[in-house]
Structures are given as structure tokens and as C-alpha cells.
Image (cartoon, rainbow, N blue to C red):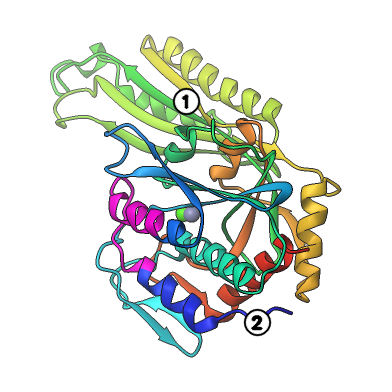
Amino acid sequence: MTTINEQRLVQHFLDLVRIDSESGNEKAIASTLAEQLGELGFDVQRLPVAEELSNGFNLYARLEGTEEQILLSCHMDTVTPGNGIEPVIEQGIIRSAGDTILGGDDKSGIAAIMEAVRILKEQGLPHPTIELAFTVFEEGGLHGSKNFDMSPIQSKQAIVLDSGGPIGTIITVAPGQQNIKATITGKPAHAGLAPETGINALTVAADAITKMKLSRIDEETTANIGVVKGGNATNIVMPELYLEAEARSLDDGKLAAQTQHMVETLESVAAEHGAKVAIETKRAYNAYRIADDHPLITGIKQGFEAIGVSPQTRPTGGGSDANIFNEKGLTTVNLSTGMAKVHTTEEEIAVADLVAISQFLVAYLSR
Ligand code: ZN
Ligand code: CA
């Protein structure tokens, strides 16, 4: 098995997490990576995105190899609190000093890819043509991948490195998500003088929610109401209420049915109460499902087996850039880098996992 330069890998990872890059503020990390990839021999393209999205840019990079091609992808942004990250290594585990996230989500993937390429080059190992897509603003919307200019990309298959779980985890199934925004309009009235002449929007919402299937719908489908806003004073019958909900499913038909159920329940209950409801629903992203015998999966499995790790395909409940790249026509899976407790100030990653995912990439790319 190829020996990874652990010290160089860890140092690069620590350098990357020290660069502030909360979603929207990717200029510094994108510029640094563009420069480093250029030095590594990649042809780098800075792909502009709308100013509202990021002060930085999406990154596309290409390293010529054999006729085969593969796209590797990570996101460059982090959740909050992600500024001033001070990484600490204790007994082989990398964490933040405690008041921020670590940013291993998703810089562990970036560091692993770049270390693997360094090894391939140093050892003169044959490799396919490697394309990279490093995205801005993945967290909270998958915006960077949605707005990624796909025109330079020639690969038909892609690997996103942006998941947790044991090394060897291959996410082959991920849900689609539908967002629902509803405004219920009742009728204001003086709460003391004539409450019976009003229609309380909260009462309408409560009745609708009681009649709605929510939480875990079945093994493939979930639904949640996450935002509710309404009311100004106790002496006014609440005239208006706004809510945001979502539904997810691994099955597009079930997602459509759950969404319709939520919309129809809101509409029929509002009508029963003499209230009005305005509903907007929008597909955030589509589900994907890659068969276990797809050549992309069998190749990845061989890569893990070559480093003595048993690969596991499994579904997830979360969305990632892999959903978007699948939608855009690339067969894409999402692999674990070993990142854990992401989106919390306890986020961590084991040095051994960072090494293992880099080793996997060397094995996979040079197989
Ligand atoms: Zn991530
Ligand atoms: Ca994340």
C-alpha cells in the first residue's frame, strides 16, 4: 500500500481550516486553492458565480492522464461559527479549540484529494484524467453546485467527498427535498370585545398540522415544519401566520404525494375555517439512486479493498452536491472522509481517517 506523507497531509489540512470561509465568503480559500492546484500541475479555471452568492468563485481544475476521466468534488464553504478556527490535535484526533466548528466538512476531502495527487505525481503512477469541481455555498442550499458552469466538465462520473461515517462508506442513495412556504390569512378582531368575529390564523395552522402526517412518514420519507412566525399582541386575534416546511423522500413519487398531502391539508383546513392560505412549493433538489453494480461503484469498492477497508454502500437522509451533479447528468456518489459531529463545535476527524481516505484515492486513481 502506498505510504501517504502524513505530516504534509495534516499540515495542509490545518492550513486550509485556518482560512475563514463561511458560506458566501469563499474568496480567500478559492484563491489559495486555485494557486496551489496550479502549482500541482492542474489547469485551473475560476468559474464566476453571482455576487449575491459569493465573493469568491467556483473552481474547476483538470490534470491530464489516461483516456479515462473522473470528476472529484468538494465544497469550499463551511457553516458557522467558522471564523478564526484554531485546530488542535490530541491523540490522533483533530478538533477546533472549542468555540468554532473544525471545517473538516469539507476541507478534509480537499486535503485528501490534493495529497493523493501529490503521491501519484511523486511516484509516477498512471492515473485517469482528473477533473476537480470545488464549490462555493454548499451549506444551506447547494448553491455552488446548482450554479456550477458544467461546460468544461468531460467526465461522466463523479465522486463527492462530503459525508461522515466509517471510511469505506459510499452514499449511493439520497433523498430529494421539497420546500413549502405558506401564509395563512385569517381575520383580525379585538380579543376582548369581539373575538368570535375573528379568525385566528394560529388556530387554523394548529388544526391543519394536527391533521397532517409529519416527522417519519415511512422508511424513505420524512416531513417537518421548521419555521413558524405570527402575531403581534395578545389583544388581537392573530390575523396572519407564516410557516416553512419540508418533505424529503428517496422516492420521487412518495415525495410528490407527501407534498400534495401537506398542501391539500393546509388548503382544506383553511377553507373550513373561512381563512385563506397562499402556498409556494419548490423542489430544492432531486433524489438519486446508483445501483450497487454500477461500474463507478465496483471501481470504488476495488479501491477500498486494495487498502484493506471493506466498502459499504448505504442511503442517507441528507442532500449534498452529489444530488445536483446527478441531476446535471453525472453519475455521482458521496464518500465519507471520516468527518464526525459536523455542524457543531465538537466536529472532529481522526488523522488515521484523513490518511485512509487519501490512500483510498491513490489506490482508486491508480488501479
Ligand atoms: Zn459538507
Ligand atoms: Ca455540511
| In the displayed structure image, the side of residue 50 where residue 360 appears, left or right | right
Q: Is residue 126 magenta?
A: no
Q: Residue furthest bottom?
A: 91
**Can residue 109 be seen by looking at this rendering?**
yes
Q: Position of residue 31 (x, y in %)?
A: 33, 53
Name the residue beneath numbered marker 1.
208
Vertical arrangement, residue 46 with respect to residue 309, above or below: above
Residue 41 vs residue 310, the one in the foreground: 41
Residue 367 vs residue 300, the one in the foreground: 367
Q: Quadrant of the N terminus?
A: bottom right
Identify the mark at residue 3; answer none if there is no mark.
2
**Is the C-beta of the residue carrying label 1 under 8 Å from the nearest atom of ligand 2?**
no
Vertical arrangement, residue 144 with respect to residue 282, above or below: below
Helix, strand or loop at mark 2? loop
- The image quadrant of residue 153 is top right
Q: Residue at x 29, y 55 (%)?
A: 28
Vertical arrangement, residue 244 with respect to residue 22, above or below: above
Helix, strand or loop at mark 1? helix
**Can residue 137 be seen by looking at this rendering?**
no
- The image quadrant of residue 90 is bottom left
Crowding around mark 1 (Cα neighbors within 10 Å: few <14, some 14 to 19, many 20+) is many
Q: Is residue 33 magenta?
A: yes
Q: Which residues are magenta?
A: 16-35
Three-letter code for the amino acid on which mark 2 is drawn:
Thr
Nearer the observer: mark 1 or 2; the answer is 2
Q: Position of residue 328 (x, y in %)?
A: 60, 31
Q: Quadrant of the C terminus?
A: bottom right
| In the displayed structure image, the side of residue 323 where residue 61 appears, left or right | left
Crowding around mark 2 (Cα neighbors within 10 Å: few <14, some 14 to 19, many 20+) is few
Nearest to N terminus: mark 1 or mark 2: 2
Q: Position of residue 207 (x, y in %)?
A: 45, 26
- The image quadrant of residue 183 is top left
